[in-house]
Image (cartoon, rainbow, N blue to C red):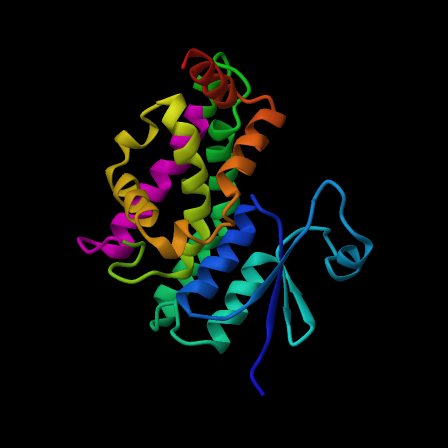
């Protein structure tokens, strides 16, 4: 009997998208239930100890935390997205563990609340981007376009959602943040040109993400709103 996969999701969560990218890369057939994270149902809280998405039910057994889900899928479903070499695989896992710090500072730009707060947010993001620039140079050398070279990995699945969200806000913020980091910039371009990554969201993602920008009172939303008012 075939394994069944049921993903508990929210429309805009980047950690959910990480799981979806992994499943899309492996051609896993799955069902999705979307929940409102501001009004979490009791049945969800019973299976998610942190009250967070994603949760992936595998034959009705719930798995939680996006990293655990990605690792489980990579162990059980071909093709493997981790490198075969143990040292390279360990380094990939280490750079995946760097993601929360990177995501926090890049999201600080995406969700910046004012023009005045933007320089500090950019400076924090630049420090993380510099470390990532150095990592890409070491891990893939002259190959590309992905983190390890010519094939998508779990590192790509992890970072892609945050680079996608940054790209949406960058259309109006126009910070030029990635210009000083050509390897990260090229990596981002490759991920955002890959339907496995950008297609791993619900059809209503863009509208819901903009609603998040508005709800958080972001500078990006102020610019979006002003541009639309001027049309």
> Residue 134 lies in magenta, yes or no?
yes
**Image height check: is 6 above or below 209?**
below
Q: Nearer the viewer, residue 20 or 71?
A: 20
The residue positioned 73% from the left and 51% from the top of the image is: 51
The quadrant in which the C terminus is found is top left
Residue at the front extreme, as displayed:
231
Magenta-tinted stretch: 122-145
The quadrant in which the N terminus is found is bottom right
Residue at the left extreme, as displayed:
142
Q: Position of residue 210 (x, y in %)?
A: 52, 31
**Residue 156 visible in the current orientation:** no
Q: Position of residue 133 (x, y in %)?
A: 31, 42
Q: Position of residue 112 (x, y in %)?
A: 52, 23
The residue positioned 39% from the left and 67% from the top of the image is: 82
**Image height check: is 143 above or below 181?**
below
Q: Nearer the viewer, residue 71 or 174?
A: 174
> Residue 97 lies in magenta, yes or no?
no
Q: Main secondary structure of the magenta part?
A: helix
The residue positioned 47% from the left and 48% from the top of the image is: 98
**Residue 182 visible in the current orientation:** yes
**Image height check: is 21 above or below 113?**
below
**Image height check: is 212 above or below 219?**
below
Quadrant housing residue 152 = bottom left
């Amino acid at each position: 009997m075939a394994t069944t996969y049921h993903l508990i999701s929210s429309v805009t969560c980047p950690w959910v998208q990480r799981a979806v990218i992994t499943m899309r890369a492996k051609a896993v057939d799955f069902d999705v239930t979307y929940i409102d994270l501001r009004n979490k149902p009791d049945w969800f809280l019973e299976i998610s100890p942190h009250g967070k998405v994603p949760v992936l039910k595998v034959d009705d057994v719930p798995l939680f935390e996006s990293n655990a889900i990605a690792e489980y899928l990579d162990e059980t479903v071909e093709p493997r997205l981790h490198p075969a070499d143990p040292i390279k695989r360990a380094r990939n896992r280490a750079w995946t563990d760097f993601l929360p710090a990177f995501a926090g500072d890049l999201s600080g730009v995406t969700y910046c609340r004012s023009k005045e707060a933007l320089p500090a947010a950019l400076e924090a993001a630049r420090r993380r981007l510099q470390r990532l620039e150095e990592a890409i140079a070491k891990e893939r050398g002259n190959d590309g376009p992905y983190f390890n070279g010519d094939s998508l990995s779990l590192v790509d699945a992890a970072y892609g959602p945050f680079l996608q969200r940054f790209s949406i806000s960058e259309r109006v913020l126009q910070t030029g943040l990635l210009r000083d980091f050509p390897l990260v910039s090229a990596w981002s371009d490759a991920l955002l040109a890959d339907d496995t990554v950008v297609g791993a969201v619900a059809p209503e993602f863009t509208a819901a993400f903009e609603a998040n920008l508005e709800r958080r009172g972001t500078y990006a939303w102020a610019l979006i709103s002003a541009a639309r008012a001027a049309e």
